Image (cartoon, grey):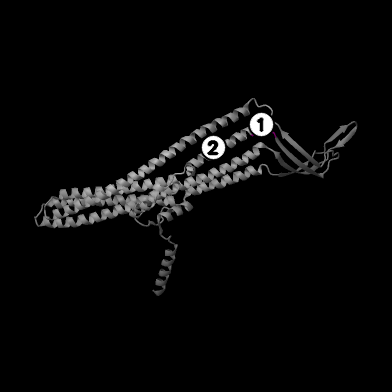
Amino acid sequence: MVTFSAFALSLSVRVAAQLPAALSFTLEQAKEHAVKYNRTLQKAGIAVEEAHEALWQAISAGLPKVDATVDYSNYLGFNMSLQGMSIAFNPTSSAKATLSQLVFSGAYWVGIDMAKIARKISEKSIEKTELDVKENVTLTYYAILLARQNKEILLGNIANLRDIHKRTDDLARAEIVEKTNADQIAVQVMNLEAALHSLDRQTELAYNMLRLHLGLAPGAELSVVGGIDDHVAALASAGLDGKVFDLAGNIDFRLLKSQEELQQQQIRLDRAAYLPTISGFYSYTYKIIKPAFDMSPPHVLGLQANIPIFSSFQRRSKVRQSEIKLRALQTDIEQVADQLNIQEKQLRYNLRNASEQYEIQRRNVEVSKRVFDNSVRKHEYGAISSLDLTTANNNYLQAESNMLSSKNELLKAQTELLKLLGEL
């Protein structure tokens, strides 16, 4: 029996050690974790690696290259008669090594510059993706905290109504009040319990979304730290009104400027098609099996120039098309700059408006709570009906719901502004 207990204890310890530990994150910790493990960001990182290899591919096109060939030929005893002489074609074999080097190519240097810009765009794209991921994590985190506070409000309200229902039911049994008063309160309790169950399902959905953003397994145990009011209170010290919007620091604007730079290099590449391409080579051939007559030298050094002369204006059309695309892109950049400046003003307006609405809803909750508490006392003395009590309770719950919505809008406006400023 002792042996079995020891075995069971040992087994339970091993199983517990294999279970994944529950994860708990603050908002900043959640964003840091997402930056490391979010799969969308990991894919963007792969794109940066690919762009880096593309740059080395462009560079290697102008570096020395060495190729080697080995051949063997057998003429199957063929003889050729020449002026009464019979010449036998014996088997031959040779090994050849060739060193080639690009000497001049305008397209080569432009191609390297374009590959560098493409790599820079990939790096900026991962920065943009990181901002998107942080925004998603932040908003999902806030949704969980809001749901948690909403649940606390519902649980407190349900407990309060259950106590009122018990007292009302006792009065109904004593025939002091009508039983319908107790029934109305019971229905209200059932409605709130159903709302609580729905809120639990919504909270689990929000946790699943957060797991996805964090790159966690679907079944990973996860919890968030803190309360929503902590983040609302932190807004006062965020100093967003004093933060200046720098257009040149906005990631969307910088991406467009990099695309403009890439298009300018495309024009250079199209113009480079007018220039010649010069390459040199050296080859050495070693005869493994020599033929009867061998007139070919073992060493060969040469240059080759490819000179474009006339292309029926095809090259000119390509250059002009690239110039037109550049003008169109520059127009887009000016438009986006105007849009970003307008968006910055709109987001600041949204933040101020959300802050004002939150203050109004906060005071509305205080008033609705006092009205509900007074209604409870009046109901105990029979001064109002259960219908009046449930109406006061619904008004209080609606006020709480409106305040939670105002908190959500306030934090959402802050998040959007921080993202635009590049400080999320």
Does residue 359 lie above or below 86 as drawn?
Answer: below
In whole angstroms, how far apart are the C-alphas of marks 1 and 2? 23 Å
Q: Which residue is mark 1?
A: 274
The picture places residue 164, in percent across and down from the top left corner, at 17, 56
Q: Tell me the kind of residue under disc 2.
A: Glu
- Please tell me which of labels 1 and 2 falls first in the chain: 2
User: Magenta span has 190?
Assistant: no
Q: Say whether residue 204 is visible.
A: no
Q: Tell me the kind of residue under disc 1.
A: Tyr
Report crowding for label 2: few under 14, some 14 to 19, many 20 or more residues within 10 A (C-alpha).
Answer: many
* Nearer to the camera, 333 or 111: 333
Does residue 9 lie above or below 293 as drawn?
Answer: below
Q: Say whether residue 111 is visible.
A: yes
As drawn, the residue found furthest toward the right would be: 84
Report crowding for label 1: few under 14, some 14 to 19, many 20 or more residues within 10 A (C-alpha).
Answer: some
Write the start and end of the magenta stretch as one range.
272-276
Q: Is residue 330 left or right of residue 417?
A: right
Quarter placement of the N terminus: bottom left
Indicate the secondary structure of the residue bearing disc 2. Answer: helix
Q: Is residue 350 left or right of residue 54?
A: left
Indicate the secondary structure of the residue bearing disc 1. Answer: loop
The picture places residue 262, in percent across and down from the top left corner, at 56, 38
As drawn, the residue found furthest toward the left would be: 175
* Nearer to the camera, 315 or 302: 315
Q: Which residue is mark 2?
A: 260
The picture places residue 288, in percent across and down from the top left corner, at 81, 45
Overall secondary structure of the magenta section: loop
